[in-house]
Every structure is written in structure tokens, then in C-alpha cells.
Image (cartoon, grey):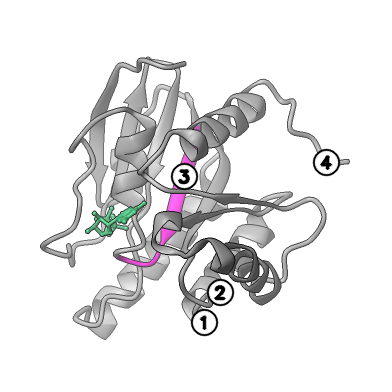
Amino acid sequence: MNLHNASLKVSAVNAKQYPTDGYMEFAFAGRSNVGKSSLINKLLNRKSLARVSGTPGKTATINFYNIDDTIYLVDLPGYGYAQRSKAETEKWGKMMEDYLANREQLVQTILLVDSRHKPTNDDIQMCEWIRHYHDRVIVVATKLDKLKKREIEPNLERIWETLDLGEDDILVPFTTNDDEGKYTVWDMINMMRAGELEEE
Ligand code: GDP
């Protein structure tokens, strides 16, 4: 899958608006500004299908991108917005929990963390949520190009340890500057589609 036909199917604010086609779904979660829109655009070879931040959205929506009428890439609302009110944060939590717990089409949620930083408490909680709902945790460490070469290994190790990853889990280094991470993420998605990424 190199050239994709991708379009935003729906920007949902509640479960009634989720697509009903039944395609498998692969979701992306992470802190605001972690590089989620950039990663989705990179996967799809698009400049700006998913919105790249500037105006951090306060409205929590779940965005479903139809890919080739076969799967959905799902952009989950980011967390960690300082300007989100308590009520808005609660709404975010309900929406996320409802999607993660009840969505039958959801195959895997992929967690994005910034490769430069130690994962935050919010990242750890999100990771625990994902572990609860899936057999394995897949983490993408974003903005790898911002690290010096000698920082890469220790930073990835710090992410692995802080998130308490185990032998079935996967950590993928990622940057939008080259295509390596993009191909790795697509390979994982395609293996999951085919049921080939099984537990050891
Ligand atoms: P989102 O809020 O998680 O959707 O994050 P965005 O995709 O909007 O990215 C936040 C900022 O990080 C933007 O200024 C992006 O250009 C930048 N960014 C995202 N990915 C990368 C990357 O791989 N390398 C670098 N250097 N910057 C990136």
C-alpha cells in the first residue's frame, strides 16, 4: 500500500456518528502536539488531510479516515491541553473510554509519545488503558530527527522503561523526515489486518 485513497469520513462527537461500514480500525492516541496529525498525513502521503496544530482544538472529536474503502485510521482526541476545562476533560475521558471499551471494529490503538521526553503521567495512564483493552501495546516515538544520534538509544530505553513495556510490546522510532517509520507502521497495520501479528 503506497498510494492511498484517503478521506475524512466523519469527525464524530458521539458514538452514534461512528461509521457503520464495519471496516477494521487502527487508532492513534497521544498528547496534543506529539505529532499525531503529522504521522497520519505522513502515512497517507498527504500534506494536510489531518490537521497539523497551530490552533489546538479544544473540541474532542474522533476522526475516522477511510483508507481505500478497506480500513479506518482513527485520530483520537489528544490529551494534555492546559486550556481544557474539567468538564471538557471529563467528556474526553468518557468518549475515549466508550470508544476503546466498546468498539468492535477497533483492532489496535497505537500510542504516540515524543521521543525527546520521558513519558508523562498522562502517557502512562493512556498506555495502561491500551494494555487493558488490547493484547499488546504499540508505541510510536515521534520526532526522532530532533534527537542527536547518541541520544536515540537512551531515550528509547527511557520510554520502554517508563511505560513498563514487555516482550510482546512494540516501540517504533518515527520521524516525518524520512520514510522508514512510515513503512514500519504500515507493515504492522497490514500484519494486524491479516492476523499475522500474533502473540508469541
Ligand atoms: P498533534 O497535535 O499531535 O496532531 O501534532 P502535530 O502533527 O500538529 O505536530 C505538532 C508539531 O510538531 C508541528 O509543528 C509539527 O510540524 C511538528 N512535528 C511533527 N512531527 C515531527 C517530526 O517528525 N519531526 C519534527 N522535527 N517535527 C515534527
Report the mark closest to the observer, 2 or 1: 1
Q: Identify the mark nearer the N-term, 4 or 1.
A: 1
- Give amino acid for label 2: Gln
In the rendered image, residue 119, in percent from the top left (x then y), is placed at 52, 75
- The residue tagged with tag 2: helix, strand or loop? helix
Mark 2–mark 1 CB contact (< 8 Å): yes
- Give amino acid for label 1: Asn
Mark 4–mark 1 CB contact (< 8 Å): no
Judged left or right of residue 56, residue 26 is right
Give the quadrant of residue 187: top right
Q: Is residue 18 visible?
A: no
- The residue tagged with tag 3: helix, strand or loop? strand
Q: Write the start and end of the magenta stretch as one range.
A: 25-32
Judged left or right of residue 142, residue 5 is left
Q: CA distance from mark 3 to mark 2?
A: 16 Å
- The residue tagged with tag 1: helix, strand or loop? helix
Q: Residue at x 47, y 24 (%)?
A: 23
- Give amino acid for label 4: Glu
Identify residue for label 1.
Answer: 121
Q: Residue at x 58, y 70 (%)?
A: 155
Q: Residues within 10 Å of mark 4 (few under 14, many from 20)?
A: few
Identify residue for label 3.
Answer: 27
Q: Is 67 rendered above or below residue 113? A: above
Q: Residues within 10 Å of mark 3 (few under 14, many from 20)?
A: many
- The residue tagged with tag 4: helix, strand or loop? loop
Q: Is mark 4 within 8 Å of ligand 1?
A: no
